[in-house]
Structures are given as structure tokens and as C-alpha cells.
Image (cartoon, rainbow, N blue to C red):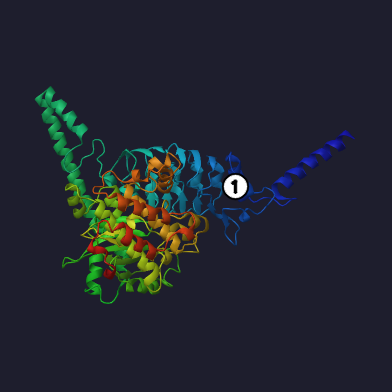
């Protein structure tokens, strides 16, 4: 009798476990078990995770989870902006078919699990704006399919693992605003990323940020610590001085010889990204010109394209790498290299580019033509000598114009900022209301506002977000938009409208006014972004305090009117935001009136 009761008891426990795992015997999938482990690790999971039910055997119906239609494996996990708190569990590595992971803008803490290196199908990894600590796991170097990596605005420490240089498909990299130290690896793909990918890490050094590392030979002389050591040696005795000098000269000669042979082999063999560009234009490439905008033969253009290498890179971002293309007659163009995303990339590319090439406007960057190659598309734009607004506001620049103005303390005074804001507004208004077909930009930000020789604004990269949509690889909303500029409803639905552009423009205005990035570290520490900061100051009637203290000539009446229109643009309700035509009207009638200028004449369009 006792044995029978015990057997029934064991059977009851087994049935209860099966019910908990799969609703009456239907087993929860391994991906579902990994997700439940994730849910358990988050102490406060009010909202989206509460709707993950263990009794449901199909996690593909859970909020934030997207599965492959055929295999039913999880390929996209989007839990961004959910106020989640806890450690990211190691079981996340069991989602080995995962292509996109978005855990950004939460309160996750602890280390980045090294088990993420098991997710070898991962194309996009977003962990920015959390409280993650520890080192960047070297196992991330296993993610050879990775194209987008953003782990910025955390508290990560230690050095950047050299294994990240193996991520040859990487398009976007953001390690900024952490506590990383040591030399930035110069091998592999990391060499192509510029200062913006590493800014805010005071302990980093390397060629990417123009910061010499200790004992590194820069420009034919050793670092300060080496110089100090040599000075001490000279103070001791002349013999040591002679030995030290001889060793130094020998080392410099060796370095020079290595550099010579390195450059020789580099040019001969065409390694790394340069080889890729040469292969692009050397394997049956053709040049398409719009309306005679390129007064050169296809042969001359291709010949110039074949000479481009890493030394000609002037920028990189979500849409590709940008090169400086100088022709023999002195004309200079910007070349944007876009890698093909899938096999169907060519189906509508030429038709869409024909449309973009037909759009001409004073406040838009002119697309002259493109090089059509089997591996990538090389878009040829006008070169803007003033660089990007992002460079002017936040960092060092290669623009001689900006450097000259900076030395004269005239860089971005009040009139210049108003001029840029109005120019960007007019360019965006033209895209929304006047060009045919109408275009939603989807990625308005300071790096997509370029400046000419007179510091007038030109909107760039319009139309590329739609052009690069890739439903097959599920990265539509990743390509279209940059965190900090995105409207709340766009982050939730992924559906872009004119009003999402208006929100991004409002953020841009605040960035120009304050000189701070939308996700400045001072905001993140308080759980805010630039819009939250404005709302906080406005609640205490202190909104004027957000103006950049480097900005000279501020006029209070214009400032108040500009803050008012910016607050309308960043309203949380899309219906409360003005159209860009209305924004231009307000700028001209209320903001520019105290300081009239002929550059905003309505007939100039």
C-alpha cells in the first residue's frame, strides 16, 4: 500500500512539472527555456516579461520575440526601453539562432556574458545605456556575422580585446562612454573606425583617436615617458647617453624600414579594406551618372576609385564607409561605400537611386552618380569642405575651414547655429512636402548634416534608410535611425512618418543649442536624455540654461522662440508636432526676426 501511494505521489509531481513546462504535456522549446531563465534573472519584470507564460509552449508569440517562420527558432529579441533590471544570464547563449539582440536602455548590471559568443548568427548586438561592468568578453570575436555592435554608455573597464578585430562584417561600432583603457587594437577591422566609436574613454590610446600610447613612436619621436627616461640617462653619464641615442636611432631606422616594407607590401598586395575596394571596381564595375553631373569618363572615374585606400576614409556610419575622391582636375567628391545586404539588393536599387539623383535642392547634398559593382555600391556625392555638424559640435575635425574658424574663436556662434538650423529645416521640409516622391529621412542627426565652406547646412543620406530596408534579414528598424534621435512611437512600432522626422529634428535643435549629444553621459547618470533634460529645466523655468556656454551672441528673444518650437517638435504625441513647413515658417517669422539675414529669403528655395 505504501509503495502504491509513493508511486502515485511521484507520478503527480511528474505531471505537475510537465504542466509547468508545456501545458499538459507539451514541452516548452529549448529557446523558450532559455527565455524563461532570462525572465527569472530579472527581479523587476513588470510589463513585457510578465506576459511570457511558462504554460505556453510557443515562445514565438511572446512580446518582444520574433521567430523564423520555418524553423520556429528565436531570431530577434527586442527588450529595449523596458526599465528591466538584473544581470544578463548566461543562458542567453543558448539562443544560437539569434540574429538581433536589443537590450539597450534598461538597467542591466553585471558582466556581459561570454556565452554570447555562442550566438554565431548574431548580426546586431545592442547593449548600450545600461550599467554593465567588467571587461568586454573576448568571445564576442566569435560573432563573425556581426554588423552592428553598440555597448556604449555603460561602465565597462579593461582593454578592448583584439578578437573584435576579427569581426570583418562590422559596419557600426560604438564603444564610447565607458572606462576602457589601453591601446586600441590596430589589427583587423578596428582600424577603420574613427574617434566617434571610442570617445568618452579617457584611458584609451591609439591611431584611431590620434592619441599616442606610452613608449609608442609617433611622428619620428618617442613618447614623453621615453624622453624623460633619456633625459635621466643623460644626467647620469655620457656613455649611457651614447648607448641610448644609438639604440633610439637604430629603433627608429628599424621602424622606418618596417613602415617602408609594410607600405610597399600593402600597395602591392592590396590588403584589408583597400583590397575590397579595388576588387569592387575591378570586377566588372560600371559607372552611372545622373544628368551629366559627372564630367568624366567611366574609365577615368574607375581608375581613381582603384587608388582609394584606408588613408582616404573621412567617415563611417550605419550606411557605410565614406572616402574622399579627388579627381585630377582638382574637383573633390565624397564616395559612400554600401555593402550588399542580401541577394535581392539589386532588384530596386537602380530605380530608387535614379529618384534620389533627380532631387536637387540648395539644402540637400547632391548625389552625382554611383558605381555599380557585384560586391557593393559606391555612391558619389558632392564633397562638403566644412565636414559634419557632429564634428563641429563635439570633436576634432579634418576640416581646414572648421579649424580656421576655431582658432579665431568664431566657430558656431549664435548666428551660425541659427543658420544651420534653418538650412536643415528647409532641406527636410523640401523632402516632406515639395519633392516627388515625398521622402521620410528616418535618420536625422548631426552627423547627417554637412556644412559647406560658408557653414551652411546640407541634409545628407536622405532616402538611404528606405533603400537599405532588408526584411529578409530583419534589420529594417536598425538601419533606420540612431538612438537618442528616435521618436517614442517609432521605437515601439518601427513605423516611420513625417512626424518621426520632426521629432528627430527637434532633438537636433537641442543638440545645436546645448553642444551636447542627445545621450550625453551627464544625462544618462540621471536617467535622462536631452529631451528629458529640457523638460526638467522647463518645469523650473530654467530652459535657457541649456545653451552652450561657448556660444556667443545669444539673443534672448530668438532663444525663447527657438526653445518653444523645439519643445513642440519633441512632443511625445505625434499629432502635437508641427509639420516641417510650419517649422520653417516659425523659424523665419519668430526666431530669425530679431536678427534678420538675407539667407532665409523664402525665394531662395
Residue projecting furthest to the right: 1
Residue 590, image x and y in percent?
Answer: 33, 58
At a point 30% along the width and 71% down the height, the residue shown is: 360
Residue 475, image x and y in percent?
Answer: 47, 59
Q: Nearer the viewer, residue 500 or 52?
A: 500
Task: Find residue 524 and report its image quarter.
Answer: top left
Quadrant holding the N terminus:
top right
Mark 1, other Cα within 10 Å: few <14 / some 14–19 / many ≥20: few
Residue corresponding to mark 1: 47
Residue 21, image x and y in percent?
Answer: 69, 47
Residue projecting furthest to the bottom: 291
Task: Find residue 333 and report its image quarter.
Answer: bottom left
Residue projecting furthest to the top: 236
Please say whether residue 168 is visible from this viewpoint: no
Element assignment for label 1 = loop
Residue 579, image x and y in percent?
Answer: 41, 63
Q: Nearer the viewer, residue 453 or 234?
A: 453
Answer with left or right where residue 33 lies relative to residue 424.
right
Looking at the image, residue 285 lies above or below residue 27: below
At a point 33% along the width and 54% down the height, the residue shown is: 446
Quadrant holding the C terminus:
bottom left
Q: Nearer the viewer, residue 314 or 496?
A: 496
Amino acid at each position: 500500500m505504501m509503495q502504491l501511494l509513493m508511486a502515485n505521489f511521484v507520478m503527480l509531481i511528474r505531471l505537475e512539472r510537465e504542466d509547468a513546462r508545456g501545458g499538459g504535456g507539451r514541452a516548452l522549446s529549448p529557446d523558450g527555456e532559455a527565455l524563461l531563465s532570462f525572465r527569472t534573472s530579472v527581479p523587476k519584470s513588470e510589463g513585457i516579461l510578465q506576459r511570457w507564460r511558462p504554460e505556453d509552449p510557443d515562445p514565438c508569440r511572446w512580446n518582444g520575440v520574433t521567430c523564423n517562420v520555418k524553423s520556429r527558432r528565436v531570431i530577434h529579441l527586442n527588450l529595449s526601453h523596458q526599465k528591466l533590471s538584473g544581470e544578463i544570464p548566461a543562458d542567453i547563449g543558448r539562443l544560437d539562432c539569434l540574429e538581433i539582440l536589443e537590450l539597450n536602455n534598461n538597467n542591466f548590471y553585471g558582466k556581459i556574458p561570454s556565452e554570447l559568443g555562442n550566438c554565431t548568427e548574431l548580426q546586431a548586438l545592442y547593449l548600450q545605456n545600461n550599467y554593465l561592468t567588467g571587461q568586454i568578453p573576448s568571445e564576442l570575436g566569435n560573432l563573425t556575422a556581426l554588423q552592428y555592435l553598440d555597448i556604449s554608455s555603460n561602465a565597462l573597464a579593461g582593454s578592448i580585446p583584439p578578437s573584435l578585430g576579427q569581426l570583418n562584417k562590422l559596419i557600426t561600432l560604438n564603444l564610447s562612454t565607458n572606462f576602457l583603457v589601453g591601446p586600441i587594437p590596430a589589427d583587423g577591422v578596428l582600424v577603420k573606425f574613427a574617434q566617434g566609436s571610442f570617445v568618452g574613454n579617457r584611458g584609451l590610446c591609439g591611431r584611431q583617436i590620434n592619441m599616442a600610447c606610452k613608449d609608442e613612436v609617433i611622428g619620428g619621436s618617442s613618447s614623453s615617458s621615453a624622453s624623460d627616461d633619456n633625459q635621466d640617462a643623460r644626467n647620469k653619464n655620457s656613455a649611457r647617453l651614447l648607448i641610448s641615442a644609438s639604440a633610439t636611432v637604430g629603433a627608429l631606422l628599424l621602424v622606418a624600414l618596417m613602415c617602408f616594407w609594410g607600405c610597399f607590401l600593402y600597395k602591392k598586395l592590396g590588403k584589408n579594406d583597400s583590397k575590397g575596394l579595388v576588387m569592387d571596381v575591378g570586377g566588372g564595375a560600371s559607372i552611372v551618372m545622373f544628368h551629366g553631373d559627372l564630367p568624366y569618363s567611366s574609365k577615368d572615374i574607375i581608375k581613381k576609385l582603384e587608388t582609394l585606400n584606408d588613408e582616404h576614409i573621412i567617415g563611417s556610419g550605419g550606411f557605410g564607409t565614406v572616402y574622399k575622391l579627388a579627381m585630377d582636375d582638382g574637383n573633390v567628391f565624397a564616395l559612400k561605400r554600401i555593402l550588399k545586404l542580401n541577394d535581392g539588393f539589386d532588384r530596386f536599387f537602380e530605380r530608387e537611386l535614379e529618384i534620389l539623383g533627380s532631387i536637387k535642392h540648395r539644402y540637400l547634398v547632391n548625389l552625382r552618380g554611383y558605381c555599380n559593382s557585384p560586391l557593393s555600391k559606391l555612391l558619389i556625392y558632392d564633397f562638403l569642405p566644412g565636414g559634419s555638424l557632429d564634428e563641429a559640435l563635439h570633436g576634432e575635425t579634418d576640416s581646414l575651414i572648421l579649424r580656421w574658424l576655431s582658432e579665431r574663436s568664431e566657430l558656431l556662434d549664435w548666428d551660425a547655429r541659427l543658420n544651420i538650423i534653418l538650412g536643415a529645416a528647409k532641406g527636410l521640409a523640401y523632402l516632406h512636402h515639395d519633392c516627388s516622391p515625398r521622402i521620410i529621412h528616418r535618420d536625422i542627426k548631426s552627423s547627417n548634416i554637412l556644412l559647406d565652406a560658408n557653414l551652411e547646412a546640407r541634409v545628407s543620406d536622405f532616402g538611404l534608410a528606405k533603400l537599405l530596408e532588408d526584411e529578409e534579414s530583419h534589420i529594417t528598424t536598425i538601419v533606420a535611425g540612431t538612438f537618442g534621435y528616435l521618436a517614442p512611437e517609432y521605437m515601439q512600432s518601427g513605423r516611420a512618418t513625417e512626424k518621426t522626422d520632426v521629432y528627430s529634428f527637434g532633438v537636433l535643435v537641442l543638440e545645436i543649442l546645448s553642444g551636447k549629444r542627445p545621450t550625453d553621459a551627464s544625462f544618462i547618470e540621471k536617467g535622462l536624455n536631452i529631451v528629458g533634460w529640457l523638460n526638467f529645466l522647463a518645469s523650473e523655468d530654467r530652459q535657457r540654461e541649456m545653451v552652450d556656454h561657448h556660444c556667443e551672441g545669444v539673443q534672448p528673444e530668438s532663444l525663447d522662440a527657438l526653445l518653444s518650437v523645439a519643445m513642440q517638435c519633441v512632443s511625445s504625441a505625434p499629432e502635437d508636432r508641427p509639420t516641417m513647413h510650419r517649422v520653417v515658417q516659425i523659424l523665419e517669422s519668430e526666431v530669425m526676426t530679431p536678427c534678420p539675414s538675407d539667407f532665409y529669403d523664402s525665394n531662395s528655395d
